[in-house]
Image (spheres, grey):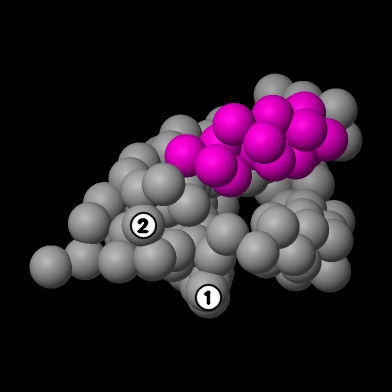
Amino acid sequence: MILYNVTVNVEDSIHDNWIKWMKETHIPDVMNTGMFEEHKVLKLLSQLPEEEGTTYAIQYFCKSLEDLEHYQQNFAPKLQEDHLKRYGNKVIAFRTILEIV
């Protein structure tokens, strides 16, 4: 199984709107691609006091690298563009791919 992890830091000024949109719109859109079997939303608790915003790990689980590659080629560009248009630089994200062993 493959874990596609999106780590996101969200500015406080948009936090409530962002988390609502993620849960009601973005994550369902990602799951509706059929490429993932489940997802989890985790909030980072170990942030340093000087760090701004709130950091989350959005985790998506898929059966194979092929499924993930299909998602990245056919669905991710539009979904990421929608996110960028909505929140711009108020959200910073990076993505990692892990294999569950």
Extent of the magenta region: 69-84
In the rendered image, the vertical position of residue 63 relative to residue 83, given as above or below: below
How many angstroms separate mark 1 from mark 2 (CA)?
Answer: 13 Å
Nearest to the observer: residue 6 or residue 16: 6
Circle 2 crowding by C-alpha within 10 Å: few under 14, some 14–19, many from 20: some
Does residue 44 appear in this view?
no
- The quadrant the C terminus occupies is bottom left
User: Which numbered dot is residue 64?
Assistant: 2
In the rendered image, the vertical position of residue 100 relative to residue 5, given as above or below: below
Query: Residue at left 56%, top 36%?
Result: 72
Query: Residue at left 84%, top 61%?
Result: 25
Give the image location of residue 45, x and y in percent.
38, 66
Give the image location of residue 74, x and y in percent.
67, 36
Residue at mark 1:
38
Nearest to the observer: residue 8 or residue 75: 75
Give the image location of residue 10, x and y in percent.
63, 44
Dot placed on the residue nearer the N-terminal end, 1 or 2: 1
Picture quadrant where residue 19 is located: bottom right
Q: Are marks 1 and 2 in contact (CB under 8 Å)?
A: no
Q: Amino acid at mark 1?
A: Glu
In the rendered image, the vertical position of residue 71 relative to residue 40, given as above or below: above
Circle 1 crowding by C-alpha within 10 Å: few under 14, some 14–19, many from 20: few
Q: Amino acid at mark 2?
A: Ser
Picture quadrant where residue 20 is located: bottom right
Q: Is residue 70 magenta-colored?
A: yes
User: Which numbered dot is residue 30?
Assistant: none
Judged left or right of residue 64, residue 74 is right
Q: Say which element carries label 2.
A: loop
